[in-house]
Image (tube, rainbow, N blue to C red):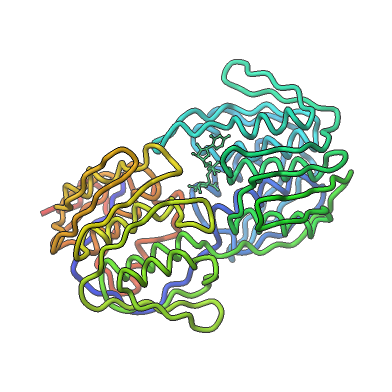
């Protein structure tokens, strides 16, 4: 079993290039189900979640060729199955993104229900209710949702909470439905906009992307396209915070600074020096101790829940007291117990973590429980004195492309070791 050994206390210096966004790549891969013919996707990140999604599409009869340079050639002309098996959905919840496109294109879908996960219950009721409103007949049988519709029809759909994959699933379904669909209180995340822009290229009639009301006029056919995956704002935010944790100066290149507006405001308030250079680079510098700031996660453009665990590391070594409130997922503080093992002073009260900054963290063996928690523990390892051994690295590989290599290139002492080779001392 792989783990990461990090010898902390080294400042970082150099440039890190950001990869394509996982959360944009997955819905965009799914959108290739909506049209026959050859798609070309570039900047597809090399991640475990992308490999699982590609495996799922292949199970459905989609042809996928992955080239050396992060390009995928995809053709779903031979789509011959409507079933997403438990084995794949269990490994990755975002597999539910095939539900909308399959019902829209084939008139039926059978998709395993994902169940809970480490960060909360994460239901998919919005996806299901939306499809029902669009005329699909749904049945839950043997852990699968079975959906049927000769042709979906447009509908007015309101999200109680602006769900990211819910918006994506229903937006894709609406593109092939008859008539007009209005998605209200829709998600505004850049990844939703990226998917919408791709669908527009494919010939879909979509208005209101990036706002909370998305209007789609359905059509019978869409065409295949060439598409470049947008840079991963969560990966970029994580490396900005890596510089905050370790100190030094980094240039983050191939990012969209606008997507990180709120994150940069918080990091500036915490005392990091940030400068946008060109249109796709941010320079970050830390000198001295950070300030404590309060953080509350919110749907975009608020502070992303996917960076909550990472900013907690900065607050754990900041000057005073900070309150970090998680409003999106009910169980997203699993990293707190591990940070405490490194000497952090954190108390969880309901949905808030009260973080009293300590002078320094001390290295120890820790266990990652989910994707973003694993990134948080790597950052904590960079900040800590001595050696930190992060176990459960498979979580990290789901969503960060070669994080250990990228950090080693800018001076971090980090290496991937087999459990038995490591020296936690
Ligand atoms: C996506 C991201 C994930 C991110 C999350 C929130 C992808 C592949 N994953 O996950 O990285 O952390 O957005 O930004 O893009 N909810 C319901 N019913 C539903 C759907 C959602 O109650 O049918 C609730 C969820 O439990 C959660 C909230 O809505 O409390 C937001 O979840 P949602 O935006 O759907 O998250 P995902 O799309 O799964």
* Residue 394 position within the rendered picture, expressed as x and y whole percent measured from the top left: 38, 46
Q: Is residue 160 above or below residue 341?
A: above
Q: Which quarter shows the C terminus?
A: bottom left
| Side of 25 where 411 appears, left or right | left
Depth order, front residue of 124/18: 124
Q: Residue at x 65, y 58 (%)?
A: 210
* Residue 156 position within the rendered picture, expressed as x and y whole percent measured from the top left: 76, 38
Total residue callouts:
0
Depth order, front residue of 304/211: 211
Q: Residue at x 49, y 68 (%)?
A: 261
| Side of 316 where 35 appears, left or right | right
Residue most extreme to the bottom? 278
Residue most extreme to the left? 425
Depth order, front residue of 330/403: 330
| Side of 90 where 127 appears, left or right | right
Depth order, front residue of 83/260: 260
Q: Is residue 67 above or below residue 306?
A: below
| Side of 365 where 127 appears, left or right | right
* Residue 268 position within the rendered picture, expressed as x and y whole percent measured from the top left: 36, 72
- Quadrant for residue 351, please give it: top left
Q: Which quarter shows the N terminus?
A: top left
* Residue 382 position within the rendered picture, expressed as x and y whole percent measured from the top left: 24, 63
Q: Residue at x 79, y 48 (%)?
A: 216
- Quadrant for residue 30, please give it: top right
């Amino acid at each position: 079993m792989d783990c990461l050994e990090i010898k902390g206390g080294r400042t970082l210096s150099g440039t890190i290039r950001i990869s394509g966004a996982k959360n944009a790549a997955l819905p965009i891969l799914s959108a290739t189900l909506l049209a026959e013919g050859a798609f070309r996707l570039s900047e597809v990140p090399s991640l475990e979640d992308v490999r699982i999604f590609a495996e799922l599409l292949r199970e459905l009869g989609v042809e996928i060729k992955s080239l050396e340079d992060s390009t995928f050639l995809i053709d779903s002309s031979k789509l011959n199955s409507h079933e997403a098996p438990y084995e794949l959905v269990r490994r990755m919840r975002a597999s539910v993104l095939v539900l909308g496109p399959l019902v829209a294109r084939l008139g039926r879908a059978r998709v395993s229900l994902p169940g809970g996960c480490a960060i909360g219950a994460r239901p998919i009721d919005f996806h299901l209710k939306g499809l029902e409103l669009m005329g699909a007949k749904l049945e839950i049988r043997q852990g699968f949702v079975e959906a049927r519709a000769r042709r979906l029809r447009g509908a007015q759909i309101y999200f109680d909470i602006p769900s990211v994959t819910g918006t994506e699933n229903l937006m894709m379904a609406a593109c092939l439905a008859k008539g007009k669909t209005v998605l209200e209180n829709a998600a505004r995340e850049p990844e939703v906009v990226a998917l919408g822009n791709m669908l527009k290229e494919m010939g879909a009639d979509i208005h209101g992307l990036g706002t909370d009301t998305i209007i789609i006029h359905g059509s019978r056919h869409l065409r295949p396209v060439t598409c470049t995956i947008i840079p991963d704002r969560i990966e970029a935010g994580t490396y900005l915070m890596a510089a905050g944790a370790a100190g030094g100066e980094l240039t983050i290149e191939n990012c969209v600074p606008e997507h990180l507006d709120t994150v940069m405001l918080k990091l500036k308030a915490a005392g990091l020096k940030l400068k946008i250079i060109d249109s796709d680079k941010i320079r970050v510098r830390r000198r001295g101790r950070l300030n404590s700031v309060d953080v509350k996660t919110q749907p975009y453009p608020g502070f992303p829940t996917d960076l909550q665990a990472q900013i907690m590391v900065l607050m754990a070594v900041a000057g005073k007291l900070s309150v970090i409130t998680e409003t999106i997922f009910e169980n997203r503080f699993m990293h707190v117990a591990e940070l405490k093992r490194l000497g952090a002073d954190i108390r969880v009260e309901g949905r808030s973590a009260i973080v009293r900054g300590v002078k320094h963290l001390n290295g120890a063996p820790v266990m990652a429980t989910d994707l973003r928690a694993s990134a948080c523990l790597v950052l904590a390892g960079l900040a800590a004195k001595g050696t930190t051994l992060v176990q459960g690295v498979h979580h990290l590989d789901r969503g960060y492309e070669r994080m250990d290599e990228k950090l080693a290139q800018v001076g971090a002492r980090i290496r991937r070791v087999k459990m038995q080779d490591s020296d936690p001392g």
